[in-house]
Amino acid sequence: MAHQDEYNVIHDIVKLLADDGFGALGEALRMILNQAMILERQQHLGVGPYERSDTRNGYANGYKSKTVQTRIGSLDLDIPQVRDCTFYPSSLEKGLRSERALKVALAEMYVQGVSTRKVAKITEQLCGFEVTSTQVSRAAKELDNVLDKWRSRQLGAYPYVYLDARYEKVRHNGSVVDVAVLVAIGVSDTGHRHILGTSIALSEQEVHWRDFLRSLQQRNLHGVKLFTSDAHEGLKAARKAVFPSIPWQRCQFHLQQNAQAYVPKQQMKKEVAADIRSIFNAPTAAEAQRLLGQLLERYEKSAPRLTAWAETNIPEGLSVFEFPSEHWRRIRTSNVLERVNKEIRRRTRVATIFPNEASCLRLVSAVLMEISEDWETGRIYLKV
């Protein structure tokens, strides 16, 4: 019976889109969300419609109407209820949290008189609330309560931790400045990825990184066996101060890019890149050291600046050899953070310039919280 209901919904959506095209997107999304919430309630209860079971987790209790605002207009949804009020569909909340954060950021810009063509188009239909300072403040506070709780949650054991920083433009004292957005990702004992935290500040980079790492420590981050990151000077100093005994793996991808600045001739770049790649792809640490020695000898005369740089920097990318070989591909670069940063950038570029630090932190946190929730129920990143 349940499968027949799902089939009927899919059939109705396809017919709707075939008849009305893009004009039916709002109604199609409404039907999809309603069906997703029904399926989620069934999973919560442990039974399907009209099924009997001694192990069920409660009873369905009808639906409650709710109107939500999206960029394709208002959606009138039917929120499934249960008798003990222990259920709320995450499929609804997860998809709307970053949307709400973006709207609040744009509305704040509007209220504060930031005159841009994009912001001038904000209307109550877009934001879902009256664009006044009081309403914007209320909407921001409601969202901040959820995000603050997520950012301050207790952590646990994470053998592998990745760190990175990116920059966003924020208005500060009448001018536009770049603020550092710090992000930490951890791989847990189960092999799943989690966003551990994020921070935004105008402070000096080392001070900011040190405060951020200490906050992770205070939230019970432990069991770390390796940090992976690029060679940010502020990060290196802060990591040594807060986690002095934990090994560090310098991102091999960024090392490859950095090396090119020390190659004196264009025709040498491919050859140098291949030689460095062979070091990183070596089967053992001893072989990697042997290949590094070869590289230093080969380019000692033709590229002295390269050999001086390589002798000091390339060994920082070889910590990975002290860990299980089946983990090397996942822990030798910080590429997992590059993909996260792309998703953050996709959302923040709509706002362009944030009205304040809190607005930037709100949107970044909402995006990261949604990514982390998807990871928690997704496939294993590596077998720990």
Image (spheres, rainbow, N blue to C red):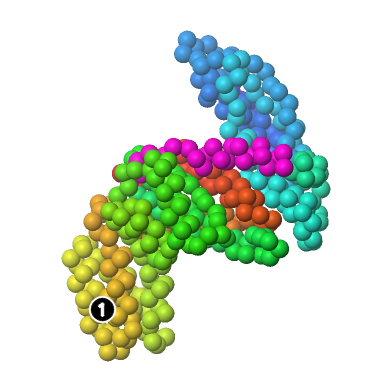
Please tell me which residue lies in front, 238 or 359.
Answer: 238
Q: Which residues are magenta?
A: 137-159
Residue at image position (54%, 47%) is 368
Please tell me which residue lies in front, 243 or 73.
Answer: 243
Residue 383 visible in the displayed image? no
Seen in the picture, residue 223 relative to 92 is either above or below; the reply is: below
Q: Position of residue 188 (x, y in %)?
A: 37, 42
Q: Residues within 10 Å of mark 1 (few under 14, many from 20)?
A: some
Residue 224 visible in the displayed image? yes
Instruction: Please state the total of marks drawn on the protein image.
Output: 1
Seen in the picture, residue 271 relative to 106 is either above or below; the reply is: below
Q: SS class of the residue under badge 1?
A: helix
**Residue type beneath disc 1:** Leu
Left or right of 72 on screen, residue 58:
left
Residue at image position (28%, 84%) is 299
Question: Would residue 383 be counted in the magenta stretch?
Answer: no
Please tell me which residue lies in front, 269 or 166.
Answer: 166
Q: Position of residue 38 (x, y in %)?
A: 61, 26
- Quarter of the image with the C terminus in it: top left
Residue at image position (18%, 65%) is 286
Seen in the picture, residue 259 relative to 119 is either above or below; the reply is: below
The residue where tag 1 is placed is 295
Q: Main secondary structure of the magenta part?
A: helix
Q: Position of residue 134 (x, y in %)?
A: 77, 41
Residue at image position (74%, 43%) is 136
